[in-house]
């Protein structure tokens, strides 16, 4: 792609949960502006992989680097790195005791030390962008799931991250709300945001991904463009997986 | 199992530290031991041995109850030196009041069988009124307010409040000087005497006389006051504190009884008159209060309060 | 009933002392308890052990013993503090254990996901604690904390045994002079009831106001 280093680079990453080997020699590099969608059956290690990139899950061996900087261990340096890596969770994880606006301004004010006025201004712009400007003063519990997840995306965007991680962002949503979230994500992808998305939404993968990764048993089994992967999967396991998710 | 032990270890270690601290603070008072030795001489048993047995006592409801039970139930305290102090090792209660209770039991039953129920100053009238105890023998000051609720025997002891100060004290010479001063005392009769005798003093209350003494030593209070005999018993071999010659507030102690059995009061009054007359009272005084106090006692004048 | 009129000043003074003891003790117990809970939850094993040891020892000692050690033990090492302060320190040290345990269970009630979200935003551990964990757990702790406050009010009666003339001690003294136990202790009960009901009611109001809807 370019001569600059990849934005996210994993090399020989291994991770165990006790005796369970959940990531096996995972090597991956994600370029600037690239949208990588990770799919695979549950238990394949795809969520763990996503969470290891900002060290919510520490790894046992291998290296992970973001923008050329290896992931620091716990401490200030790690916090600084996390500020540049946005994350959207399956269960939204909005701060229940703060309004939507305060959820979005918390990071910029506390971490980026932005003046409150400026942070609020930017937050309102972002809430407008994800389509929930009118919900700014409400508490999270008063919003629908789809609205909460869009607020969570705005919260991640407010940090102006270099890369956004999505960990099954639509899995906890009622079907009629999935699209409002996917639409926001698609528009982000179109605007050039670097994204790593763990999802079961094949339509989104086809539509928005630059590259699709298929994981099973802790390994990346396939990686390629959506066309290559969906039209001509190379492994039996990928074919098996696709036949199950696409024909139901 | 391993988990439980894990939680237990720090708890046990901490408790041990606390106990060591407690032991250290008591060994820091060498005089405590000597005072205890003096108190070991307080023994009313010989006086009780020679005590009288009442003859032809009328079978009042209280007497009947006591005889059926085979023991006298008396409310009292266990922490008043030379009056009623329990030896935690043997459980034996020694002192003047303990002797009075045993003598009364012997007078009624022929045997000095006393069952002591400990009570604070606040519950004594109620215990008598609801029949939980037969009598109160507990440095129980005869006052008008209490006399409205219960019956008192004729006075069996006349107490005077004394004042203990630090040896280097120069401001306090007699009771009048205590006005505006912090004075340590025990709740109950001692506090009452202080409040009545020197209303301008500020009583600082501690549960035990040892704590009063310690508070005086540490400078938390200016003086320590309670009945003279109790004071003497605690400080007899102390050098850093002294008992002032001055006393105040003569107080009479009586045996408390329920009002429901006026005939029983006559028996108890007769008992007090008898032991004063036959020398038992003097013997009891010699072996208890007399161990620490040299001045001869003021004998109660048998009569009606 | 003339007892009330005769001893009005003393009784009010006693009640005031009880209120002062409680009002000074509660915030101290709270701060100490939060610090203890931080120790008990922190990743450093030594600090965690210190926190655990403190709670296990102090909570399992009678409060009166604790206060007695402060009153009579500290002067042995050259530290004599006023009796009122001794009682406040003793009660604070003791009730801090309960605050600590309340805070700990309150913290456990905060969703792990929200903590992860805060960490993912780049908040340092202490900032996560201050901005997300503590405010949320405090909300779920309003009632348990009020119960601790009430226990402090009632526990302050131990001051009577250590030279601090609060409500219980005052009532006991009045009864000593007047021999009106039922009236006296009914008065004390009423005094405590007024204070504890006030705390309970206030806690209810605060809880309704700060409740986190999930």
Image (tube, rainbow, N blue to C red):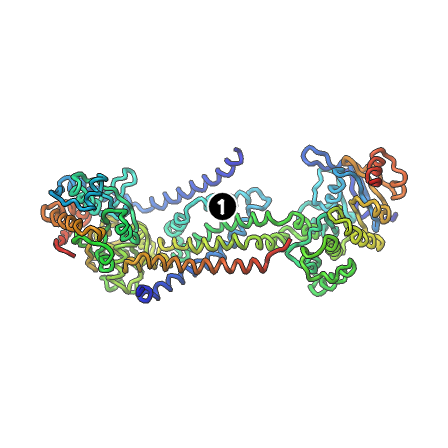
Q: How many marks?
A: 1
Coordinates of residue C16 in the picture (x, y in percent): 40, 63
Q: Which residue is mark 1?
A: C55
As drawn, is A147 to the left or to the right of A234?
Answer: left
Coordinates of residue A201 in the picture (x, y in percent): 81, 45
The part of the image, by quadrant, that contains residue A14 is: top right
The residue at 87%/37% (across/down) is: A233
What secondary structure is found at the residue carrying circle 1? helix
Q: Outermost residue, left direction?
A: B278
Q: Nearer the viewer, residue C61 or A146?
A: A146
Coordinates of residue B102 in the picture (x, y in percent): 19, 43
Label 1 packing within 10 angstroms: few (<14), some (14-19), many (20+): many
The residue at 59%/58% (across/down) is: C210
As drawn, is B95 to the left or to the right of C6?
Answer: left
Coordinates of residue C17 in the picture (x, y in percent): 40, 61
Vertical side of A43 occupied by C25: above or below: below
Quadrant location of the C terminus of chain B in the rendered image: bottom left
Q: Nearer the viewer, residue C79 or B103?
A: B103
Indicate the chain on which mark 1 is placed.
C
As drawn, is B123 to the left or to the right of B295?
Answer: right
| Residue A17 visible in the current orientation | yes
| Residue A69 visible in the current orientation | no
């Amino acid at each position: 792609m370019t001569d600059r280093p990849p934005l996210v680079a994993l090399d020989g990453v291994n991770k165990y949960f006790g005796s369970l080997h959940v990531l096996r020699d995972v090597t991956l590099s994600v370029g600037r502006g690239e949208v990588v969608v990770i799919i695979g059956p549950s238990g394949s290690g795809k969520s763990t992989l996503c969470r290891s990139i900002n060290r919510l899950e520490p790894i046992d061996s291998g290296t992970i680097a973001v923008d050329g900087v290896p992931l620091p261990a716990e401490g200030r340096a790690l916090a600084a790195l996390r500020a540049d890596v946005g994350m959207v969770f399956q269960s939204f994880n909005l701060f229940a005791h703060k309004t939507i606006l305060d959820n979005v301004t918390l990071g910029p004010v506390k971490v980026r030390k932005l003046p409150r006025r400026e942070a609020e201004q930017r937050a309102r712009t972002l809430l407008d962008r994800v389509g929930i400007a009118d919900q700014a003063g409400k508490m999270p519990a008063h919003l629908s799931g789809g609205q909460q997840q869009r607020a969570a995306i705005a919260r991640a965007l407010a940090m102006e991250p270099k890369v956004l991680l999505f960990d099954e962002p639509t899995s906890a949503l009622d079907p009629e709300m999935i699209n409002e979230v996917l639409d926001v994500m698609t528009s982000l992808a179109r605007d050039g945001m670097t994204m790593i998305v763990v999802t079961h939404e094949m339509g989104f993968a086809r539509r928005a991904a630059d590259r699709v990764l298929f994981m099973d048993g802790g390994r990346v089994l396939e990686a390629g463009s959506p066309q290559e992967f969906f039209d001509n999967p190379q492994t039996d396991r990928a074919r098996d997986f696709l036949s199950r998710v696409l024909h139901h | 199992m391993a988990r439980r032990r894990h939680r237990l270890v720090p708890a046990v270690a901490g408790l041990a530290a606390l106990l060591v601290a407690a032991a250290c603070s008591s060994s820091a008072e060498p005089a405590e031991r000597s005072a205890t030795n003096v108190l070991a001489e307080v023994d009313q048993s010989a006086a009780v041995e020679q005590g009288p047995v009442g003859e032809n006592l009328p079978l009042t409801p209280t007497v009947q109850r006591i005889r059926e039970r085979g023991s006298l139930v008396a409310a009292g305290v266990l922490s008043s030196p030379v009056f009623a102090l329990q030896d935690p090792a043997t459980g034996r209660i020694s002192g003047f009041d303990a002797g009075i209770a045993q003598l009364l039991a012997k007078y009624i039953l022929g045997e000095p069988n006393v069952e002591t129920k400990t009570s604070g100053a606040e519950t004594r009238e109620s215990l008598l009124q609801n029949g939980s105890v037969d009598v109160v023998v507990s440095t129980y000051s005869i006052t008008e307010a209490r006399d409205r609720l219960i019956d008192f025997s004729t006075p069996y002891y006349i107490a005077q409040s004394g004042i203990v100060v630090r040896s280097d004290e120069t401001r306090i010479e007699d009771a009048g000087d205590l006005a505006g001063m912090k004075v340590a005392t025990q709740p109950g009769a001692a506090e009452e005497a202080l409040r009545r005798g020197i209303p301008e003093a500020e009583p600082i209350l501690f549960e035990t006389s040892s704590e009063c003494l310690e508070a005086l030593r540490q400078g938390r209070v200016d003086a320590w006051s309670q009945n003279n005999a109790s004071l003497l018993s605690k400080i007899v071999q102390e050098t850093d504190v002294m008992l002032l010659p001055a006393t105040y507030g003569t107080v009479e102690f009586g045996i408390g009884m329920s009002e429901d059995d006026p005939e029983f009061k006559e028996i108890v009054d007769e008992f007090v008159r008898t032991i004063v007359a036959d020398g038992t009272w003097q013997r009891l005084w010699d072996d208890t209060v007399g161990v620490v106090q040299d001045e001869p006692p003021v004998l109660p004048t048998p009569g009606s309060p | 009933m003339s007892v009330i009129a005769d001893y009005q000043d003393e009784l009010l003074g006693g009640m005031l002392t009880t209120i002062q003891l409680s009002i000074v003790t509660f915030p101290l117990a709270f701060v100490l308890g939060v610090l203890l809970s931080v120790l008990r939850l922190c990743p450093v094993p030594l600090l965690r052990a210190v926190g655990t040891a403190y709670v296990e020892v102090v909570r399992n000692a009678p409060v009166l013993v604790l206060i007695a050690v402060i009153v009579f033990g500290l002067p042995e090492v050259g530290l004599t503090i006023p009796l009122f302060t001794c009682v406040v320190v003793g009660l604070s040290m003791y009730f801090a254990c309960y605050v600590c345990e309340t805070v700990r269970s309150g913290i456990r009630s905060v969703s792990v996901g929200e903590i992860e979200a805060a960490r993912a935003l780049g908040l340092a551990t202490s900032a996560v604690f201050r901005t997300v964990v503590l405010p949320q757990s405090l909300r779920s702790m309003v009632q348990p904390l009020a119960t601790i406050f009430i226990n402090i009010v009632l526990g302050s009666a131990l001051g009577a045994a250590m030279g601090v003339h609060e409500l219980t001690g005052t009532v006991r003294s009045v009864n000593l002079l007047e021999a009106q136990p039922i009236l006296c202790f009914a008065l004390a009960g009423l005094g405590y009831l007024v204070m504890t009901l006030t705390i309970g009611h206030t806690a209810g109001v605060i809880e309704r106001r700060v409740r986190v809807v999930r």
